[in-house]
């Protein structure tokens, strides 16, 4: 066996997504609570996919499972059930050098640019640190020094910044160092966990533009976690909305923001501030949700959102809602989940949102792997935000 194992990389023409999760569930053992439960369900049957050169936004309230999902995708947590596929390979089945080779291809940018950098290391040492583990990437000191200079220039810092310490930089500059460190191993996916939430507004824009420029130059894919809906709308190609451990809606950014299928998504979007002064935007109704997010130790039966949903009905407590395709809301199904640009196969049924709800179709009838925009709800919303009761 050679000193360094490598994983085969499939061509971009391959229809499969770069990263996919199917039915991923993750629970944690906790102390017994008043309900008698000792298991906290952080993720419950999560499905998602990430295309090549694409940005997937993950949004939802605190505690909905976004960061846990990121940790699972990074192999920092092992799911209880479900499947993760990276370029067609199950990374949890890899061991030794093959696992080490895989870890080069997925990196992370952390939320706090202050805590994520070692104050005792220079910028050059921080950026070069991944090469201490992956020694064959930059085997010589001269190669490492030259690559550090390239990465500093790539993220908008000067060559002279290499010997400075983190406390000598501003918050935005520190995050640029974190991004340079993430790029050191030439990854295909970068998980960004609230990468701009700790930065000033003007600095946020600079870092977001940097991430966009890097994606265009390098073709890297992002999993972008954020509470800031305006940021997600700016950077994401597709959005997955999470609530209490479940992905309740996913689809192209414009569809999810402008034509939501799920009442929770509609409430989130109505709360987002806007500078649009048009009559349509100013006349938008604010949807106020009552109550608190239920505990993941004792989630509601049926639909997880029913305890706060203004449209909840009796059956919402009895059965989980089936995936509903965005048909009558945002036009015909726009593409296959396997590839943003690949049309749905001729033999895949394309029901509308109204017909799917009216027929009471189960999850087997609407396969989330074959649609682009879907919501998990008994009563989808029409374009005006009103529930479609069949």
Image: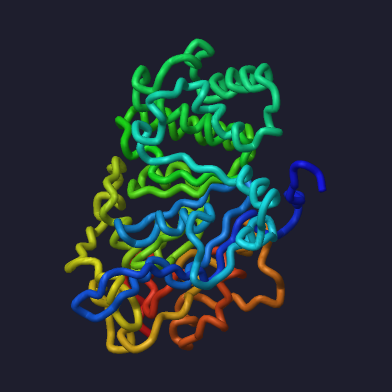
Residue 205, percent across and down?
39, 31
For this orientation, the residue located farthest to the right is: 1
Residue 43, percent across and down?
42, 67
Q: Is residue 125 above or below residue 32?
A: above
Q: Is residue 141 left or right of residue 74?
A: right
Q: Where is residue 332, by image quadrant?
A: bottom right
Q: Is residue 81 above or below residue 195?
A: below
Residue at 26 percent of width and 54 percent of height: 271
Q: Nearer the viewer, residue 145 or 377?
A: 145
Q: Is residue 355 left or right of residue 188?
A: left
Q: Is residue 314 above or below residue 42?
A: below
| Residue 333 visible in this rendered orientation of the protein | no
Residue at 41 percent of width and 80 percent of height: 321
Residue 241, percent across and down?
41, 61
For this orientation, the residue located farthest to the top is: 160
Colouring of the image:
rainbow
Residue at 44 percent of width and 86 percent of height: 358
Residue at 34 percent of width and 78 percent of height: 303
- The quadrant the C terminus occupies is bottom left
Q: Nearer the viewer, residue 33 or 325?
A: 33
Residue 328, percent across and down?
48, 71
Q: Nearer the viewer, residue 151 or 121?
A: 121
Callout count: 0
| Residue 93 visible in this rendered orientation of the protein | yes
């Amino acid at each position: 066996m050679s000193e360094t194992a490598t994983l085969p990389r499939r061509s971009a023409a391959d229809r499969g997504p770069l990263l996919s999760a199917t039915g991923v569930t993750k629970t944690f053992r906790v102390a017994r609570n008043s309900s008698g439960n000792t298991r906290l369900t952080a993720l419950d049957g999560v499905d998602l996919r990430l295309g090549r050169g694409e940005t997937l936004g993950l949004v939802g309230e605190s505690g909905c499972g976004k960061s846990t999902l990121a940790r699972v995708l990074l192999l920092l947590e092992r799911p209880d059930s479900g499947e993760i596929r990276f370029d067609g390979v199950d990374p949890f089945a890899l061991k030794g050098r093959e696992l080490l080779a895989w870890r080069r291809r997925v990196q992370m940018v952390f939320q706090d640019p202050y805590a994520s950098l070692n104050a005792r290391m220079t910028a050059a040492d921080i950026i070069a640190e991944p090469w201490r583990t992956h020694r064959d990437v930059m085997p010589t000191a001269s190669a490492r020094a030259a690559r550090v200079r390239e990465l500093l220039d790539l993220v908008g810092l000067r060559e002279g910044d290499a010997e400075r310490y983190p406390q000598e930089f501003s918050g935005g500059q520190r995050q640029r160092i974190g991004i340079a460190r993430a790029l050191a191993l030439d990854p295909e996916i970068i998980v960004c966990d609230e990468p701009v939430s700790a930065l000033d507004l003007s600095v946020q824009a600079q870092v977001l533009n940097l991430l966009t420029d890097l994606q265009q130059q390098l073709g890297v894919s992002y999993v972008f976690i954020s509470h800031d809906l305006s940021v997600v709308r700016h950077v994401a190609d597709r959005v997955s909305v999470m609530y209490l451990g479940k992905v309740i809606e996913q689809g192209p950014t414009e569809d999810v923001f402008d034509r939501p299928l799920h009442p929770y998504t509609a409430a989130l979007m109505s709360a987002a501030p806007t500078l649009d002064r048009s009559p349509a935007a100013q006349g938008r109704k604010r949807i106020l949700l009552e109550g608190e997010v239920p505990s993941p130790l004792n989630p509601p039966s049926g639909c997880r959102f029913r305890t706060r949903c203004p449209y909840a009905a009796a059956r919402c407590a009895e059965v989980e809602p089936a995936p509903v395709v965005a048909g009558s809301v945002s036009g015909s199904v726009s593409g296959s989940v396997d590839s943003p640009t690949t049309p749905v196969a001729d033999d895949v049924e394309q029901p509308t949102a109204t017909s799917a709800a009216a027929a009471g179709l189960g999850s087997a009838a609407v396969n989330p792997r074959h649609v682009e925009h879907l919501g998990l709800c008994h009563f989808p919303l029409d374009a005006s935000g009103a529930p479609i009761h069949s």
